[in-house]
Image (cartoon, rainbow, N blue to C red):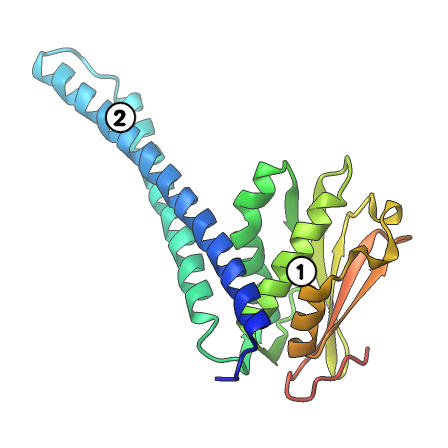
Amino acid sequence: MNHLSDGETGTGLQFFGKMTASISHEIKNVMAIINESAGLLEDYTIMAEKGIPIDPEKLKALSQRVSKQIRRAGGITRNMNSLAHSVDDFHKSVGLREILELSVGLSLRLADMKSVKLDLQLPQDPVTIITSPFHLLNLLWQVVDFAMGASGDGKTLRFTYETGPDSVKIRVTGLEMLSNLSEDAFPTETEKALLQTLGGAIFLDAKAREIQMVLPKDIRQKSTDN
């Protein structure tokens, strides 16, 4: 494991804490819905004991509701597990599609709170890079957080990526208010530190209303050539 500076550790802990808190809220919501469904099932049981007919469709709908929440909980815990293991190795081969899907999955609840839709429009061809998953997830969240504030009335952020010989370019589009912000609004020192660790760079394109992140295919090369 690489040595982390105090600044990197602090920023990483803040990111990890924010994601963990969001995940715990999601799990609580799932449990609340299942608990409500259990109460309704108990009511149906009492009705049956009294000889009151129960509509089979209501039981079917209740079963489907619980099954849906169980699947939802499975997805939440998979994301939580992936986040936890993102610190296992700071030089790791990861699928770019998978890391973007995880990033969006972790950010969905926080985006929903701001009425912002996160839309993945990713190429089908698999791309693998060697990077630090935790630092990349942290950087992606910082980008999403900034982009949500610049999304304007469109309220939709779209994610895609392109590949070059030695680098990948992640594009986040839909920043309708980007041209209204000062040039030094982003990246801040937090993102600059993460970019230095990842060997990447960020570019703002106000005309295209997008953020571009350029990362090396191998963090050990730390090349940001397109």
How far apart are the alpha carbons under marks 1 and 2?
Answer: 39 Å
Left or right of 211 in this view: 41:
left
Quick one: 129 or 59, which is closer to the camera? 129
Where, by quadrant of the figure, is residue 210 drawn? bottom right
Q: Where's residue 16, x and y in %?
A: 49, 60
Q: Please name the residue shown 50% across and 63% down the image.
A: 13
The image quadrant that residue 167 belongs to is bottom right
Q: At 85% from the left edge and 48% from the top edge, which residue is drawn?
A: 181
Residue marked by disc 1: 122
Kind of residue at disc 2: Leu
Quadrant of the rendered structure where residue 219 is? bottom right
In this rendering, the count of numbered labels is: 2
Residue type of the residue flagged with mark 1: Leu
Where the C terminus falls, by quadrant? Answer: bottom right
Question: Which element carries disc 1, helix, strand or loop?
Answer: loop
Q: Residue furthest bottom?
A: 221
**Which residue corresponds to mark 2?**
59
Location of residue 8 in the rendering, given as x and y in whole percent from the top left corner: 58, 71
Tag shown at residue 29: none
Viewer-proximal residue among 194 and 163: 194
Q: Pinpoint residue 93: horizontal percent, then vertical percent.
A: 55, 80
Q: Give the left or right position of residue 31, taking residue 92 as reference.
A: left
Q: In the rendered image of this protein, does residue 152 appear above or below residue 118?
A: above
Mark 2: secondary structure? helix
Q: Is residue 121 visible?
A: no
Left or right position of 180 against 71: right
- Comes first in the chain, label 1 or label 2: 2
Say whether residue 201 is visible. Answer: yes
Residue located at (88% from left, 48% from top)? 179
Residue at 56 percent across and 44 percent down: it is: 110
In this view, the mark in front (1 or 2): 1
Q: Crowding at label 2, few (<14), some or many (≥20) Cα neighbours within 10 Å?
A: some
